[in-house]
Image: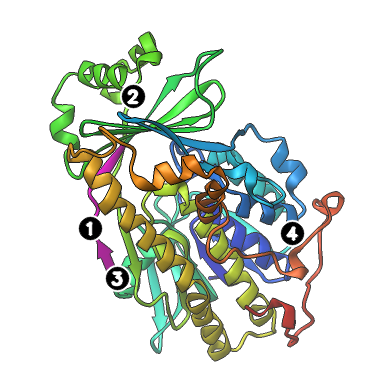
Amino acid sequence: MERTTCAVVGGGPAGIVLGLVLARAGVAVTVLEKHGDFLRDFRGDTVHPSTMTLVDELGLWDRFARLPWKAIETVRVVLDAGPAQVGDLRRLHVPHPFVAMVPQWHLLDMLAGAAEEEPTFTLRRHAEVTDLLRRDGRVTEVRWRDTDGGEHELAADLVVACDGRDSRVRALSGLPRRDFAVPMDVWWFRLPRGDGEDPAGGLGRVSDGRMVVMLDRGDHYQVAYLIPRGRDAQYRGRPVQVLRDDLRELLPWLGDRVDGLRSWDDVKLLRVTLDRLRRWSAPGLLCIGDAAHAMSPIGGVGINLAVQDAVATARALGPVLAAAPPDPATVDRAAARVQRRRWLPTVATQTAQRLAHRVVVRAALGGGALGRDRLPAPLRLLRRLPALQVVPARLVGVGVLPEHAPVWARRAPQDASAKNSSAFPSGSVNESAQP
């Protein structure tokens, strides 16, 4: 049986960032990723200013800057009553005042490459976790299966679930969960972006029971078309031409580009869920990111909250797990602190999303009079006082409680590729690492 100090299940943004930061504390960490690569489409491509600040602090900005990304600085919405700009990230006093639209697989490849330079980090691909093994009520091992069907076991002082909204580990844990009703699902697809007068940044269009969000990716738009919850199969029973006609009616400037949707195969479904665990940890186990709190796509905050969770987790657990050997009771107390630290931003963000679901999405998809004759009062206020556009920009781009990399995980850019020895002598606790 293999052994590690921390077993991280899931090689998404939360799992890789957690592995990287813990490895910089000298903690032996193994990330188990069930896929052989990171190539998944329409998966959390919005990297917010708070996450880019962390990239800076980890000494990885030079690597990030070489990735293929497109900056979004403003967000506008067009209602039947007219347009309004609802957010201006350029007004933020942060190092990177924009949202970077970057394919998630490029981001994960960059982060995994930096993590693999740390001598205590291991990434196992094609490793699908199938079970949790317990001893005296404590999770002590994970069982995983490779592509040939071979079964393996990995013992760990702590298992951290970062395996997303459909978390296998969460299901096995038995931790209690609260689910919230959502009024929508989302179709994702691409449309070509033209030169000249095509709108830049983020654009929302709402009219007569339809709602579309378009994100500028440079040479194309990433399009989110909202549909009522559970209507995917019914709507796909119609010709795809119906969708093309809707888009052309809502956004006439797209013209013949809507013909790029050749069939329903070009349209991917996201089944929206909004939930959170009432308790994130159990002896030997911790859930973070979407495994602890699945987010709505409203605001594109999911990946960024997951990364914030990962940094808070590493800061709380790095000094504890670096002890030789880690004390189980101390590890469990540190794991419980993560939920206390991240509870406020999680609840605040989900409350804002639930409010948006009720006030905006239900009205838009229900064919109500949202913005039909007159802009809603909040949009009129933002248009009259543009300086207020920094408020939604900050709530989305920075968040309620942004986390920062612990001092022991930071690197100057020129040192980002250097291997590092343990940041904590055996048994020591760095006060700066505490939440």
**In this view, the mark in front (1 or 2):** 1
Q: Residue 429 versus residue 35: which sits nearer the camera? A: 429
Q: Amino acid at mark 4?
A: Glu
Residue 180's place in the image compared with 159, above or below, is above
Q: Are marks 1 and 3 in contact (CB under 8 Å)?
A: no
Decide which of tag 1 and tag 2 comes sooner along the chain: 1
Which label lies toward us, 4 or 1? 1
Q: Give the amino acid type for the residue marked by disc 2 in the picture.
A: Asp
Of the image marks 2 and 3, the number of the one nearer the N terminus: 3
Q: Where 82 falls versus 20 (above or below)?
A: above
The residue beneath circle 4 is 118
Camera sees residue 117? no
Residue that numbered label 3 is attached to: 177
Disc 3 is placed on an element classified as strand
Q: Is residue 364 magenta?
A: no
Looking at the image, which residue sits at the far right? Answer: 414
Who is closer to the viewer here, 233 or 375?
Answer: 375
Q: CA distance from mark 2 to mark 4?
A: 40 Å
At a point 45% along the width and 42% down the height, the residue shown is: 43
Whether the residues at callouts 1 and 2 have beta carbons within 8 Å, the answer is no
Q: Secondary structure at mark 2?
A: helix
Q: CA distance from mark 2 to mark 3?
A: 34 Å
User: Is disc 1 surrounded by few (<14), some (14 to 19) or many (20+) residues within 10 Å?
Assistant: few
Mark 4 vs 3, N-terminal side: 4
* Numbered disc in front, either 1 or 3: 1
What number is the disc on residue 266?
A: 2
Chain-order first, disc 4 or disc 1: 4
Q: Circle 4 sits in a helix, a strand or a loop, which is it? A: loop
Image: magenta residue range: 178-186
